[in-house]
Image (cartoon, rainbow, N blue to C red):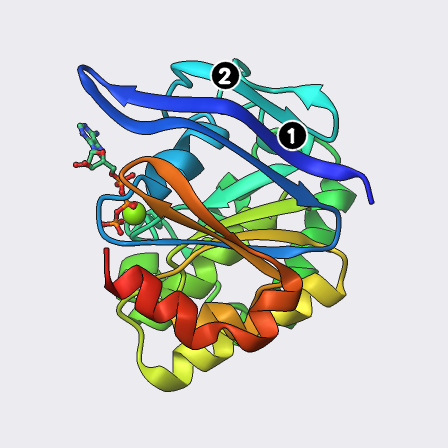
Amino acid sequence: MASLLALENFKVRYGAVEAVRGINLDIRKGEVVALLGANGAGKSSTMNGIAGLEPVAEGRVLFDGQDITDLPPEEIPVSGLTLSPEGRRVFSTLTVEDNLRMGAYGVRDGAVIDAARKRVFSLFPILAKRQGQYAGTLSGGQQQMLAIGRALMCNPRLLLLDEPSLGLAPLIVEQVFGLIATLRDQGVTIFLVEQNVAGALTIADRAYLMSSGQITRHVTADEMRTSGSMVESYLGSQ
Ligand SMILES: Nc1ncnc2c1ncn2[C@@H]1O[C@H](COP(=O)(O)OP(=O)(O)OP(=O)(O)O)[C@@H](O)[C@H]1O
Ligand SMILES: [Mg+2]
């Protein structure tokens, strides 16, 4: 199957700190792929670099065959790739409705925006009920749903999720993983960073394990079915 996202010798630096040290990976259409690793491994730097929120120091990001390495961050969603960043980052002094509108930045056709909003409300009925409410007054789980909903407003073909289950109650975590499965069934390809390794392994087709800015292991689809405890002990031992 064709590759939807490819990273080639991809590096992200903060001054002298090389947070991502030349990684290569591939995500094919329709897959859910997990990126797992300890705190500080470079997972968020990878996500932010792909989405254009941090400059790529070296290497290339290919999205559907197109080089998007140096596209400005506001143009990347228009090409069909969005990130729901770590820590949710909803605009707390804006309403749910306005947060969603921000996600549709760059979409000009009002009918397309309406359809996207309908889809988000059908995925997250609670957001429809809270449309006029300030995002800062939502619960943590609802803010996470809003962050994902906002990322869906430009109908991405590839959705990057950075720790969507972080800090959420177990029941809500289950809902978030259920949602990822639903999105996959709707044809959205997903690249997922998770601390909840067990949860990520139940949903992902494959996984890359990251340590100190490098991909140290690739867990194939075959291995995924049998190697959950291997992955957890591998990550635990780093
Ligand atoms: N804005 C920044 N300025 C300087 N260093 C940074 C910055 N952001 C991250 N780093 C450093 O880059 C490295 C990778 O951080 P990153 O946030 O990508 O890791 P992570 O795998 O997402 O960790 P976590 O699981 O804690 O979210 C760490 O050493 C971190 O301290
Ligand atoms: Mg992170």
| Left or right of 187 on screen, residue 106 | left
The residue identified by callout 2 is 59
Q: Which amino acid does label 2 sit on?
A: Gly
Please report the residue visible at 66 percent of the width from the left and 67 percent of the height from the top.
222
Expressed as whole percent of the image width and height from the top left, the position of residue 121 reads 61, 67
Q: Residue at x 28, y 20 (%)?
A: 13
> Residue 119: x percent and y percent?
69, 62
55 sits to left or right of 204: left
Q: In this view, does 19 lie above or below 182?
A: above
Does the image show residue 114?
yes
Ligand 1 closer than 8 Å to the CB at disc 2? no
Horizontal arrangement in the rendering, residue 79 relative to residue 170 (left or right):
right
- Crowding around mark 1 (Cα neighbors within 10 Å: few <14, some 14 to 19, many 20+) is some
Disc 2 secondary structure class: strand
Give coordinates of residue 181: x percent, y percent.
63, 70
Q: What residue type is labelled 1?
A: Val
Q: Which residue lies furthest to the left in this view?
A: 16
Looking at the rendering, which quadrant does residue 78 occupy? top right
Q: Which of marks 2 and 1 is nearer the N terminus?
A: 2
The residue nearer to you, when weighing 96 against 220, is 220
Q: Is mark 1 on a helix, strand or loop?
A: helix
